[in-house]
Amino acid sequence: MSLSRAAFCLLVLLMAATEPALAQQRERPRLSPRLKEELFHTVPPFAPRPPEAKPEPEKPVDPDVVILPKVVVEEKPLPRFTPDELLSRKGRTEKLLAERSSPLDRALNRFRIPIITMSPEQRVNWVYNVNRDWQRRYEILVLEKADKEKEAAPPAPGN
């Protein structure tokens, strides 16, 4: 048996031998029951103090000083822009031409009559503006519908 195992076994034996003595010391009461009863009978039971009311601040003597009510200011989030919204008009036109103009479209609309037909750049910008307008109208309709539903809803109990 190695030295560390022997030291461990000796330590376990010492702990086992001292455990009953420690248990007896813990079980022995420090005060006799009669003395304990006499002491605690004379002491009133514990009751925590009620919280103290904060005194209101005194009004200033100076009539020029105005005390305003407390206001909670909630910061609105900054608007988030997509990369497409930050493009210049020329950059947007180039991007729209690359996305929406197919080779077949370019072949069929190769020639144009300046007074009657639109250029490819004008056409993609027109389609973009029409789509953007319809999207905005849809968003307005959704907000109006939500507002009408909110007005038509019965008030919540307790309000």
Image: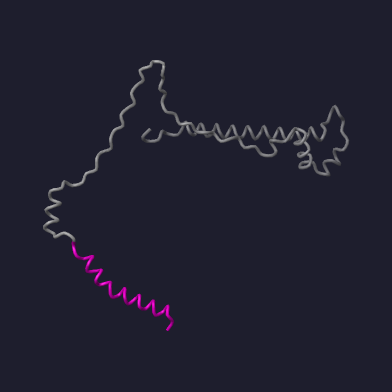
Q: Residue furthest top?
A: 63
State which quadrant residue 27 falls in: bottom left
Expressed as whole percent of the image width and height from the top left, the position of residue 107 reads 86, 41
Q: Is residue 66 above or below residue 156?
A: above
Q: Residue furthest front?
A: 3
Q: Which sits in the foreground, 74 or 139?
A: 74
Expressed as whole percent of the image width and height from the top left, the position of residue 125 reads 75, 33
Q: Is residue 32 above or below residue 57?
A: below
Residue at point 38% right, 16% down?
62
Residue at point 12% right, 56% down?
35
Q: Quadrant of the C terminus?
A: top left
**Colour mode of the rendering:** one colour
Queried whether the magenta region covers residue 7, the answer comes back as yes
Q: Magenta region, mostly helix, strand or loop?
A: helix
Residue at point 74% right, 33% down?
88
State the count of labels: 0
Q: Which sits in the foreground, 49 or 61?
A: 61
Q: Which sits in the foreground, 11 or 115?
A: 11
Expressed as whole percent of the image width and height from the top left, the position of residue 1 reads 42, 84
Expressed as whole percent of the image width and height from the top left, the position of residue 149 reads 49, 34
Residue at point 36% right, 34% down?
158
Q: Which residues are magenta?
A: 1-29
Q: Is residue 78 above or below residue 10?
A: above
State which quadrant residue 68 falls in: top left
Q: Is residue 72 above or below residue 6?
A: above
Queried whether the magenta region covers residue 14, the answer comes back as yes
